Image (cartoon, rainbow, N blue to C red):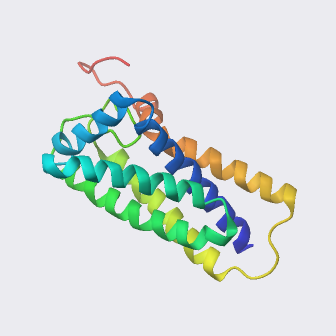
């Protein structure tokens, strides 16, 4: 049973980090926006924003690339846990500081960081950490092919829901009188 859950966590991490890295690398403008957001939104000193942007995207891409492979699962999930811990703390600080610059976590954001971003990151942190523990302690043969495929598909679906959590929450949130319409 733990190998199913570890495989699901691997899929969540692989899809989430691949999407995040790709969104920042879709063109020079997207990468420049992310780098600029690190200074204006996340409060990183301007001189450090460029190197931090490069390290962040490289870490996300490497984690996404390694996560699907059983031989690298523990390391990739541990790296994802560390990255998500840093991202969660950073977003929580932005929320506490009432940053009004739209979040660039997954490329082009429309809203400033809020509670939904912290919750999303905390869920991803828990998935990565639990996956790392399960991958490290899993015993027995890997799941059969069809079951593994379904587990990976379910993990990818969870990742896509978490990536778009901000939009999903916005869609189901009731409209208050005097607030802008959707």
Q: Give the tally of numbered discs.
A: 0
Residue 69 is left or right of residue 167, and the answer is: right
For the residue pair 151 and 24, the one nearer the viewer reads as 24
Q: Nearer the viewer, residue 149 or 2?
A: 149
Q: For the point 47% across and 63% down, which residue is it?
A: 80
Front residue of this view, candidates 77 and 22: 22
Residue 172 placement, left or right of 6 = left
Residue 151, percent across and down?
A: 73, 56
> With respect to residue 113, does 2 lie above or below?
below
User: How far across and down, in percent of the image, does residue 46 sit?
Assistant: 14, 46
Q: Is residue 46 above or below residue 109?
A: below
Where is the C terminus found, in terms of image quarters?
A: top left
> Would residue 3 be visible to someone looking at this image?
yes
- Residue at 41% across, 29% down: 27
Q: Nearer the viewer, residue 115 or 70?
A: 70
User: Taking 62 as reference, is 70 above or below it?
Assistant: below
Q: Looking at the image, which residue is at 36% across and 47% down?
A: 117
Residue 72 placement (x, y as % from top left): 61, 69
Quadrant housing the N terminus? bottom right
Q: Quadrant of residue 70?
A: bottom right
Residue 76 horizontal/vertical position (percent): 54, 66
Residue 97 appears in the figure:
no
Q: Indicate left or right for 140 with 14 as reference.
A: right
Residue drawn 45% across the image and 28% down it: 171
């Amino acid at each position: 049973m733990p190998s199913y859950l570890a495989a699901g966590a691997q899929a969540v991490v692989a899809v989430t980090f691949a999407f995040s890295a790709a969104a920042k690398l879709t063109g020079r403008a997207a990468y420049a926006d992310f780098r600029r957001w690190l200074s204006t939104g996340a409060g990183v000193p301007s001189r450090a924003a460029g190197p931090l942007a490069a390290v962040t995207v490289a870490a996300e891409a490497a984690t996404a690339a390694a996560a699907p492979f059983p031989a690298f699962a523990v390391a990739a999930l541990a790296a994802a846990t560390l990255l998500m811990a840093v991202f969660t703390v950073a977003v929580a600080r932005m929320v506490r500081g009432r940053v009004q610059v739209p979040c660039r976590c997954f490329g082009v954001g429309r809203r400033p960081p809020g509670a939904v971003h912290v919750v999303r990151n905390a869920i991803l942190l828990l998935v990565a950490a639990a996956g790392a523990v399960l991958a490290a302690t899993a015993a027995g043969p890997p799941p059969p092919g069809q079951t593994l495929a379904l587990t990976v598909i379910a993990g990818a679906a969870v990742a896509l829901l978490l990536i778009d959590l901000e939009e999903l929450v916005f869609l189901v949130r009731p409209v208050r009188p005097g607030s802008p319409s959707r």
